Image (cartoon, helix red, strand yellow):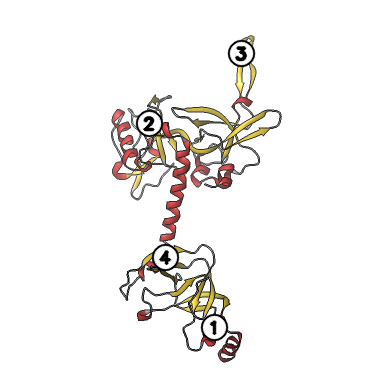
């Protein structure tokens, strides 16, 4: 997460902004003072080393939490008043403030980033791989959920469709526990169990935040704190981005067309262009001016294939600024193309492929070809 994202996901601690009011019962002789939270604040929690401390949390008008919230948070977080689901889960903020805020009149207060949510979740809304679903009850049901968090993953989702490889962890029965108090990350993945109970009010307390899933290396939030969650969210986002890139048609094509006709065993690294980039392409034709004019007119380069493509089909080029490469054109390649860097010894070059087709769209932005040769080539291709 970058600075802007965390800043907009941070909530002010409004606990000390609460006021005391006198509440009467019958007459003034039978009443007492009650605590009234700050207007528009909501109750959340702060993740501390050994517990979650209740806090009144307030979202400053300058922040745009909705722009940086996950789809899951928009469905279940108390921060969204117009949510359509039955479950309402309270935000959990980090132990350390992201910034302090000098609030007019009230003084200086701290803002803490939202790192997850906490609440009471029915067992039917705990979604696991079907092979881990349980019909056990009592203590055995608790142990079953602990075991899942130790070896796999579990999510919180309401009205999950009854299809596929995932489904409810368990179903309601007369023994229970039918509810678990859970710490949940911003994407709905369960981080830890704090309590469990039946359908009756109140929950049986467990060791605070003692069970954390194996996917997090069995890290205990009780000792590591909320920064672990932020770090893991960033890692998860990176893994998701990598997965999307790997599934891109251009990247799939790049992978499928790998060959090594010369037996040089190059070191290969691949990437998907997310913005346009300049490469240097050598003009090998005897009529270089004609080649230049054709590429300029068509706005594309034909892909090398077959025996001419020693390391796989594609457009072969050098990185921008390469020297000693003969007569060249600098080409701008748009985002969406897959690029493989090939390295043999001290030499490196690239192979570029589009998602489909026999040509790569390019734009010539520079060349070392003589102007006279370019003009002659233009006349010949018209």
At label 3, counting other C-alpha atoms closer than 10 Å, the crowd grade (few under 14, some 14-19, many 20 or more) is: few
Farthest right residue in view = 105
How many angstroms separate mark 3 from mark 4 (CA)?
69 Å
Which residue bears the numbered disc 2?
210
**Number of marks present in the image shown:** 4
Q: Which mark is residue 292?
A: 1
- On the question of residue 185 being in view, the answer is no
Q: Return the disc, 3 or 4, that comes first in the chain's sequence.
A: 3
Q: Residue at x 60, y 31 (%)?
A: 41
Which residue bears the numbered disc 4?
251
- Seen from the viewer's position, the closer of residues 304 and 70 is 304
Q: Residue at x 38, y 80 (%)?
A: 308
Q: Return the disc, 1 or 2, that comes first in the chain's sequence.
A: 2
Instruction: Say what secondary structure mark 2 lies in.
Output: loop
Q: Is residue 78 found left or right of 197 in the rendered image? A: right
| Residue 58, image x, y percentages | 60, 34
How many angstroms separate mark 2 from mark 3 (CA)?
38 Å
Q: Which mark is residue 91?
A: none
At label 2, counting other C-alpha atoms closer than 10 Å, the crowd grade (few under 14, some 14-19, many 20 or more) is: some
- Seen from the viewer's position, the closer of residues 228 and 91 is 228
Which residue bears the numbered disc 3?
32
Q: Return the disc, 4 or 1, that comes first in the chain's sequence.
A: 4
Farthest top residue in view = 29
């Amino acid at each position: 997460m970058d600075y802007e994202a965390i800043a907009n996901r941070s909530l002010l601690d409004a606990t000390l902004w609460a006021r005391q009011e006198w509440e009467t019962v019958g007459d003034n002789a039978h009443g007492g003072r009650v605590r009234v939270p700050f207007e528009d604040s909501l109750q959340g929690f702060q993740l501390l080393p050994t517990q979650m401390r209740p806090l009144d949390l307030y979202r400053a008008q300058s922040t745009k939490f909705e722009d940086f919230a996950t789809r899951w948070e928009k469905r279940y977080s108390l921060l969204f008043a117009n949510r359509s689901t039955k479950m309402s889960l309270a935000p959990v903020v980090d132990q350390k403030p992201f910034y302090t805020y000098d609030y007019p009149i009230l003084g200086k207060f701290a803002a803490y980033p939202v790192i997850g949510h906490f609440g009471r979740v029915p067992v039917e809304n705990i979604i696991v791989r079907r092979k881990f679903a349980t019909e056990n009850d009592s203590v055995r049901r608790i142990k079953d959920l602990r075991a899942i968090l130790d070896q796999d993953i579990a999510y919180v989702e309401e009205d999950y469709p009854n299809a596929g490889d995932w489904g409810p962890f368990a179903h309601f029965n007369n023994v229970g526990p039918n509810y678990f108090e859970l710490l949940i990350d911003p994407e709905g993945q369960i981080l830890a169990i704090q309590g469990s109970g039946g359908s009756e009010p109140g929950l049986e307390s467990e060791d605070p935040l003692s069970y954390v899933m194996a996917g997090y290396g069995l890290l205990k939030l009780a000792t590591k704190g909320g920064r672990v969650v932020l770090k893991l969210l960033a890692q998860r986002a990176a893994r998701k981005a990598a997965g999307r890139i790997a599934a891109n048609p251009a990247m799939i094509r790049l992978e499928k067309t790998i060959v090594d006709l010369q037996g040089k065993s190059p070191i290969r690294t691949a990437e998907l262009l997310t913005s346009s980039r300049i490469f240097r392409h050598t003009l090998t034709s005897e009529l270089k001016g004609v080649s230049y004019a054709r590429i300029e007119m068509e706005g594309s380069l034909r892909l090398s294939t077959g025996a001419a493509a020693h390391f796989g089909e594609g457009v072969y080029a050098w990185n921008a600024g390469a020297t000693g490469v003969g007569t060249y054109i600098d080409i701008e390649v748009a985002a969406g193309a897959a690029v493989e860097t090939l390295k043999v010894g001290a030499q490196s070059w690239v192979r570029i492929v589009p998602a489909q087709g026999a040509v790569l769209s390019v734009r010539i932005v520079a060349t070392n070809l003589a102007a006279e040769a370019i003009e002659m080539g233009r006349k010949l291709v018209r």
